Image (cartoon, grey):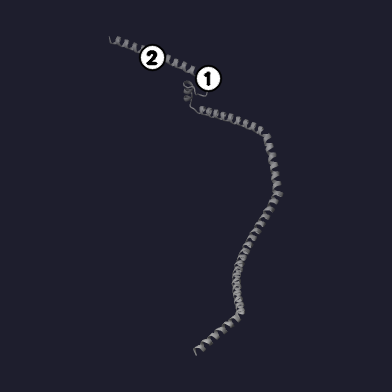
Amino acid sequence: MVLTVKSSEHLQSSAGQTSRSWQDPSVRVAERLEKVLKNVSKQAAVHESEMKDLESRLSENLSNFRAIDSLLGEAYNGLQRNTKRADRALQQQVPRMIDELEESQKVLNELTGTLPAVHTQVEGIRELYDSGREKARDLVVDLTWLNTEFYERWRLIVFTSSSPVSWRLKALMRTLFVVSFLLCFWISWIALGGAYRAHKHRLVWGEKLMS
């Protein structure tokens, strides 16, 4: 029995081996196909993720490009406006400025021609002003002198040299003062002599009367 079982098992194993060897090509092909499908699916998943990443990058770059395009458009519009303004300035303001500069040059030339005459007039006005100021100062001095009292004026003429009168008047007043002083002194001397003689004469007559 044991031999029969072993023989049957051996037959089954040999039959299985023969069946496996008979099924090997299709199984191998299926396994290979399965592996290929797995690899393809993995690569497809990888490519899909890469495509998604690339799509997100493309969308980001597209938005950046749109922003840059809008900025460039604004800059271009600004340049166009500035160009138009510059052209307008060149066409309108520059000729006006040139005309104004020419007029200013003409005025400067005229002023350059009239400047010596103006300088001469200014010098004349300055001389007139200086002479008028001197005359006004002299008038103030004369008015002050006229408003001074007679005694004060006489004292200034005789005893000082700051009086605003001529040297002839000073000499005359000083001469009159000296003459008046000498005359007063002489009169005083005569009066004192007469008084002394009268006093002496009284003393003599008093002694005579008492004796």
Task: Write the residue at 29% across / 10% down.
Answer: 207
Q: Nearer the viewer, residue 162 or 33?
A: 33
Q: Nearer the viewer, residue 24 or 15?
A: 15
Q: Which mark is residue 138?
A: none
Looking at the rendered image, the disc whose residue lies closer to the viewer, 1 or 2, is 1
Q: Residues within 10 Å of mark 1 (few under 14, many from 20)?
A: few
Task: Write the residue at 70% across / 47% down.
Answer: 94
Q: Position of residue 175 (x, y in %)?
A: 49, 16
- Spatial distance from mark 1 to mark 2, Cα to Cα? 36 Å
- Three-letter code for the amino acid on which mark 2 is drawn: Leu
Q: Is residue 165 left or right of residue 193?
A: right
* Above or below for 134 versus 46: above
Q: Secondary structure at mark 2?
A: helix
Q: Secondary structure at mark 1?
A: helix
The residue tagged 1 is: 167
Q: Position of residue 205 (x, y in %)?
A: 32, 10
Q: Position of residue 152 (x, y in %)?
A: 47, 25
Quarter of the picture containing the C terminus is top left
Q: Is residue 6 left or right of residue 207?
A: right
* Above or below for 114 versus 37: above
Q: Residues within 10 Å of mark 2 (few under 14, many from 20)?
A: few
For residue 21, which quarter of the picture? bottom right
Q: Is residue 16 left or right of residue 94?
A: left
Q: Which mark is residue 192?
A: 2
